Image (cartoon, grey):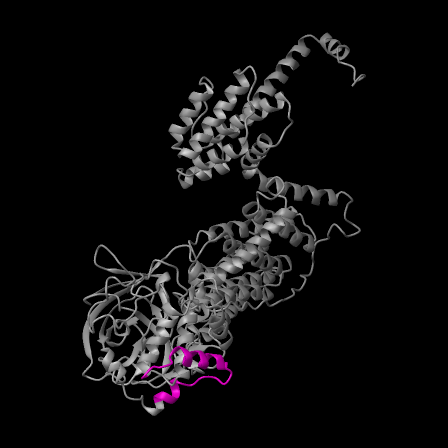
């Protein structure tokens, strides 16, 4: 293989190695195979262009053209001319897919489903990066700037994934880049002839380590290895700047036993509304518990306690090693009835969360891994990339069951706690406090005020649960929510907490999951749509206490129901909405962060000794024809595997196209629609049988195609229409032929497996009709040629009998 060929192969490998960082973002990862095939075709096109040789700019333009054609075939084939050439409709299709892909990226948690929009962004991005790397490293012979698009590709992946497995993906991408640099170095050295390697050192055998490589290459390898090692090791040795979740994957920091260190968090509500439009309620957690009932088994992730007017946030907190036994919950007295329960929890392999979901208040956690304890919120947070992926752990916790009398008689909270958790921003509109005072008028204590606020939001205030309302936790969103009275759990929980603070009641907002749905095997399944946010209010003697202002979500605590006896289960007559029945806007299964792709531009140097291009004066005039022929050859090469697909779509469009209004046109349209039905059935394995009547053929298609009633009726309607135009004295015109054909096509496709669908799309059996037609024409031509060769006089007779064009 030539030096440039090795360089092209290394550029291809480096692109795929850098693209590997995108694999954790989307499931399934089959899109990577499509991207690899396309990058290989682009690289091959560049190799052909350089071999001709073409001008460098023309080679890159040819690669860009091939890229556009491939993306058009895959993502906009129906809108393209002949399924491959872009049209305005195809361009509009690309725009729609990119817009949908952008929405999907912001909507879905990682790993996201491989929607068409996301696949276009991933595959198109990888192919464009592959084109840039090939152009810089191979066409322009400058491998160093080719690292910039590779860096952009890795940066996007690392930013979206939150750094999951970042070191390994970085190592893979860096190895690909070093491989590219090494290949370019060997290629440059080879242009100077054989490199003088010097005399081997004494005592080293010729076949020993490094003996076969020239000194410059050995030195380059060592420099590359050292640089890579420094890039990986030095960041680990440097002290963390903030020790918080904002660094990397969200792991906390702190050194030494017993800790120290602090932890801060990005707002977990960034992706709160993402889960509203999840296509399916994926199970994030499952658990088993010995609790008598699970209505209060909220799995709490964290509490947001800082309200600055723009949003609710998590305060910076100190962290320490996880204690064997957690201290007594703050403010909880021994005279409040509690029940200790044990819960075994399993997290799904795809569910990534830096904080550990647990029942509140937890008293003991048995879990492996690098976890740290934040005592104020009684939460566990992962350190140095530790997350909940696939974790199994056991939590001991308390079911706190205060009476209404205990809550009503609660003394004032400690001054320090009261100052911290009753702070509201000066920008908070006065209407918030005025509304709170109006709703709680006549209350004798903070407990009664809290219950009235909860009931006003959930029952009496005329609020509507609506997941389509724009999310927000700042003063503007709260004011808008109080005016429009529409929102989801974000609006209910944060507005109630803000109003409670204006009344002097310490309040914060917890985020996590509602109890989930019981399963037949005794476990409880918690899905993404069970994610939730709820306010926690502090009562001295009881501690932080859950309230539920969001209608149709979660369960109302017994201690807030005057009609329920203290300490008893909820009244079965009262509504207790399940947590999985409706979509929720609660925190995403994984904290998502915005993608900040840095696109770095670089320019390559032109290699000396470039061959003359077609623009050179010495170039022959026919070199332009050679370029056109090469472009045509590439297009034909790309079209060959798609010819059956393209031919089938063209035939279908011609058969279902509108025709004239005469009786002959009616007959032609009906027979064409019937032929399309039989060919479609043939594509899915039901071979045509011309010996059957249309009615019998329709029955066979329905039976062997396992058609549903709607599709079966469409087949019979078409069969009746065929009988009308063939046998009726006065044919009754059929209507809706194209719609019936579409119903039958969908009916045949639905029960077919994936392999059968691909076969019907890419290699339809009915395409054999083309071969039959060509064979018949060839036979006719052969017979005519034989007859004319044996009887030459017939040529003159044929010419003399040729009809005149006169008279039309």
Residue 601 or residue 768, whichever sits in front = 768
Residue 12 seen by the camera: yes
Q: x%, y% of residue 95?
A: 59, 54
| Residue at (19, 78) in percent of width and height | 337
The magenta segment: 417-445
Residue 353 or residue 743, whichever sits in front = 743
Q: Name the quarter where the C terminus is drawn.
A: top right
Residue 480 or residue 108, whichever sits in front = 480
Q: x%, y% of residue 365?
A: 24, 74
In this view, 159 is above or below 756: below
Q: x%, y% of residue 454?
A: 35, 73
Residue 623 or residue 41, whichever sits in front = 41
* Residue 747 picture quarter: top left
In the displayed structure image, the side of residue 108 where residue 83 appears, left or right: right
In this view, 521 is above or below 235: above
- Indicate yes or no whether the magenta region holds residue 423: yes
Q: x%, y% of residue 164?
A: 41, 67
Figure label count: 0
* Residue 406 picture quarter: bottom left
In the displayed structure image, the side of residue 484 where residue 146 appears, left or right: right
- Indicate yes or no whether the magenta region holds residue 673: no
In the displayed structure image, the side of residue 557 where residue 338 appears, left or right: left
């Amino acid at each position: 293989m030539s030096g440039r060929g090795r360089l092209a192969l290394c550029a291809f490998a480096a692109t795929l190695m850098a693209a590997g960082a995108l694999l954790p973002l989307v499931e399934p990862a089959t899109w990577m195979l499509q991207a690899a095939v396309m990058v290989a075709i682009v690289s091959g096109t560049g190799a052909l262009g350089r071999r001709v040789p073409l001008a460098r700019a023309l080679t890159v333009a040819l690669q860009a053209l091939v890229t556009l054609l491939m993306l058009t075939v895959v993502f906009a084939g129906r809108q393209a001319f002949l399924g491959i050439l872009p049209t305005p409709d195809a361009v509009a299709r690309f725009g729609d897919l990119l817009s949908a892909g952008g929405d999907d990226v912001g909507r879905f948690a990682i790993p996201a489903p491989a929607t068409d929009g996301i696949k276009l962004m991933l595959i198109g991005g990888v192919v464009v990066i592959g084109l840039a790397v090939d152009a810089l490293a191979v066409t322009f012979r400058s491998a160093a700037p080719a690292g910039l698009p590779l860096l952009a590709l890795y940066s996007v992946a690392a930013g979206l994934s939150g750094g999951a497995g970042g070191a390994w993906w970085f190592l893979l991408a860096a190895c690909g880049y070093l491989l590219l640099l090494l290949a370019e170095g060997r290629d440059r050295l080879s242009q100077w002839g054989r490199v003088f390697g010097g005399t081997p050192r004494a005592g080293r055998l010729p076949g020993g380590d490094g003996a076969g490589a020239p000194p410059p290459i050995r030195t380059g390898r060592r420099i590359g290895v050292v640089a890579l090692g420094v890039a990986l090791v030095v960041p680990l040795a440097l002290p963390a700047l903030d020790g918080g979740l904002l660094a990397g994957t969200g792991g906390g920091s702190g050194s030494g036993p017993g800790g120290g260190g602090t932890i801060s968090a990005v707002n977990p509500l960034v992706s709160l509304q993402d889960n509203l439009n999840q296509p399916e309620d994926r199970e994030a957690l499952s658990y088993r518990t010995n609790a008598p009932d699970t209505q209060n088994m909220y799995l709490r992730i964290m509490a947001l306690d800082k309200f600055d007017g723009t949003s609710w946030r998590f305060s910076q907190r100190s962290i320490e090693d996880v204690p064997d036994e957690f201290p007594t919950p703050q403010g909880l007295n021994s005279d409040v009835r509690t029940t200790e329960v044990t819960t075994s929890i399993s997290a799904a392999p795809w569910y990534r969360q830096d904080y550990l979901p647990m029942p509140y208040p937890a008293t003991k956690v048995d879990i492996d891994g690098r976890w740290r304890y934040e005592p104020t919120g009684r939460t566990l947070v992962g350190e140095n990339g530790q997350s909940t992926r696939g974790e199994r752990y056991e939590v001991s916790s308390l079911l706190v069951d205060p009476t209404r009398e205990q809550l009503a008689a609660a003394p004032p909270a400690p001054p320090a706690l009261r100052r911290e958790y009753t702070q509201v921003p000066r920008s908070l509109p006065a209407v918030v406090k005025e509304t709170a005072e109006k709703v709680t008028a006549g209350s004798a204590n903070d407990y009664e005020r809290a219950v009235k606020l909860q009931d006003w939001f959930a029952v009496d205030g005329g609020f509507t649960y609506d997941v389509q309302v724009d999310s927000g936790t700042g003063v503007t969103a709260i004011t808008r929510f109080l005016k429009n009275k529409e929102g989801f759990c974000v609006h209910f929980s944060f507005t109630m907490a803000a109003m409670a603070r204006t009344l002097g009641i310490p309040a914060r907002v917890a985020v996590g999951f509602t109890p989930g749905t019981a399963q037949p095997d005794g476990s409880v399944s918690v899905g993404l749509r069970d994610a939730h946010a709820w306010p926690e209010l502090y009562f001295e003697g009881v501690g932080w206490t859950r309230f539920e202002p969001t209608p149709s979500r979660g369960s109302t605590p017994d201690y807030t129901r005057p009609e329920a006896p203290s300490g008893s289960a909820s009244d079965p007559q009262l509504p207790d909405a399940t947590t999985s029945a409706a979509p929720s806007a609660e925190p995403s299964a994984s904290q998502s962060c915005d993608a900040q792709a840095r696109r770095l531009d670089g320019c390559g140097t032109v290699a000396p000794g470039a061959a003359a291009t077609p623009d050179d004066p010495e170039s022959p005039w026919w070199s332009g024809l050679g370029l056109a022929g090469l472009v045509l050859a590439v297009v034909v090469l790309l079209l060959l595997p798609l010819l059956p697909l393209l031919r089938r779509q063209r035939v279908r469009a011609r058969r279902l196209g509108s025709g004239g209004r005469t009786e002959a046109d009616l007959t032609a349209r009906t027979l064409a629609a019937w032929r399309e039905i039989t060919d479609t059935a043939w594509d899915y394995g039901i071979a045509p049988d011309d010996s059957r009547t249309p009615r019998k053929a329709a029955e066979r298609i329905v039976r062997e195609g396992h058609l549903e009633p709607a599709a079966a009726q469409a087949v019979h309607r078409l069969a009746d229409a065929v009988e009308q135009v063939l046998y009726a004295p006065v044919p009754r015109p059929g209507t809706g032929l194209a719609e019936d054909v579409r119903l039958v096509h969908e009916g045949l496709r639905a029960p077919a497996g994936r392999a059968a669908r691909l076969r019907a799309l890419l290699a339809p059996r009915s395409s054999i009709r083309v071969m039959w037609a060509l064979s018949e024409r060839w036979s006719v031509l052969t017979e005519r040629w034989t007859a004319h060769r044996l009887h030459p006089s017939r040529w003159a007779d044929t010419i003399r009998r040729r009809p005149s064009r006169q008279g039309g």
